[in-house]
Image (cartoon, grey):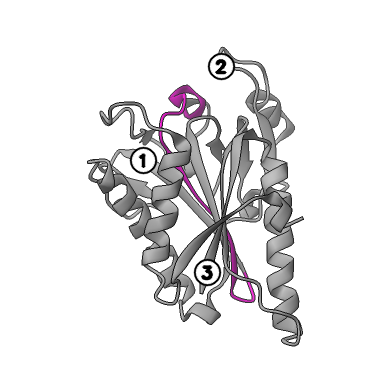
Amino acid sequence: MILRHLHIPGLTPYAHASKLQDILVARLLAHKSNPALPAPDPTIITAQFHPVYTCGRREIGSVSEEQRDYLTQSTQWGKAEFREAMRGGQTTFHGPGQVVAYPILDLRRHGISPRCWVDKLEETVIRTCADYGVQTRRTENPGVWVNEQEKICALGVHLRRNVTSHGIGLNVDPELGWFGRIVACGLQGKSTTSLAQQGVQPLLSVEDVGKIFVRTLAEGIKDIEAIAEIDEDAID
């Protein structure tokens, strides 16, 4: 089976990647409802977003206007959007210097349980960071950490009829000041770090880190035999 990889070059709006993700999810769900339709290949989107704060589904409708205004006001690094997302988890930041990866696949088709899927994403991040000489770990809190205090990767997924979407945001070399404007993922007293802050040199390409993540994830799914790079024309 082929894992299709769409990397969106440059910086892209959150809404654009979200729309592509929704198209892929809808196609998988349509096949599950009508098996006579061709089964879509699993696909992973990697991207680097314009600055955006997103909240998880449990916070939808509960973030105050005052807080939204604060998060979207001008800063020394520019302005960020605010978006609601259907993923798990709480408010986090995505932006330049961070690789976002959205795998879209039918977990049942691959024999993966929801709990094992979260573990697989975390393990893939841990192995990706190790590829650059950075040792990371799981803790009692969600995501991937370099120690008990510093988080390097946020994780939030959404499942509908075993079709998974959303995924991870791994910090390569973002402006960490953006994270200081929120209680990232609702965890008081914790901080955010990056591969660059952990001493990885020379500075990394977000695209290259994304490719390592995709390759590592594919290696962990037993029926994935190859990766095929695609562009947006293959989805639209």
Crowding near the residue tagged with mark 1, few <14, some 14–19, many ≥20 C-alpha atoms within 10 Å? many
> Residues under labels 2 and 1: Cα distance?
21 Å
Q: Name the residue under label 1.
A: 151
Q: Is any atom of residue 63 visible in this view?
A: no
Vertical position of residue 99 compared to residue 157: above or below = above
Residue reaching furthest top?
Answer: 76
Q: Which of marks 3 and 2 is in front?
A: 3
Q: Which of marks 2 and 1 is in front?
A: 2
Which quadrant holds residue 68? top right
Q: Which badge, 3 or 2, is on the more N-terminal residue?
A: 3
Label 2 SS:
loop
Q: Is 211 included in the stretch rendered in magenta?
A: no
Label 3 SS:
strand
Q: Which mark is residue 2?
A: 3
Q: Residue at x 67, y 20 (%)?
A: 73
Residue 187 place in picture, x, y as percent? 43, 42
Residue 132 place in picture, x, y as percent? 27, 41
Q: Residue 178 carries which label?
A: none
Crowding near the residue tagged with mark 2, few <14, some 14–19, many ≥20 C-alpha atoms within 10 Å? few
Q: Which residue is drawn at 30% across and 38% down?
A: 149
> Residues under labels 3 and 2: Cα distance?
39 Å
Q: Which residue is drawn at 44% across and 77% down?
A: 223
Q: Name the residue under label 2.
A: 77
Vertical position of residue 25 compared to residue 85: above or below = below
Magenta-colored span:
160-179
Left or right, residue 83 beside residue 56 = right
Q: Is any atom of residue 35 visible in this view?
A: yes
Q: Which badge, 2 or 1, is on the more N-terminal residue?
A: 2
| Residue type at the position of mark 3 | Ile
Q: Which residue is drawn at 75% across and 76% down?
A: 30
Left or right, residue 75 beside residue 144 = right
Q: Is 178 included in the stretch rendered in magenta?
A: yes
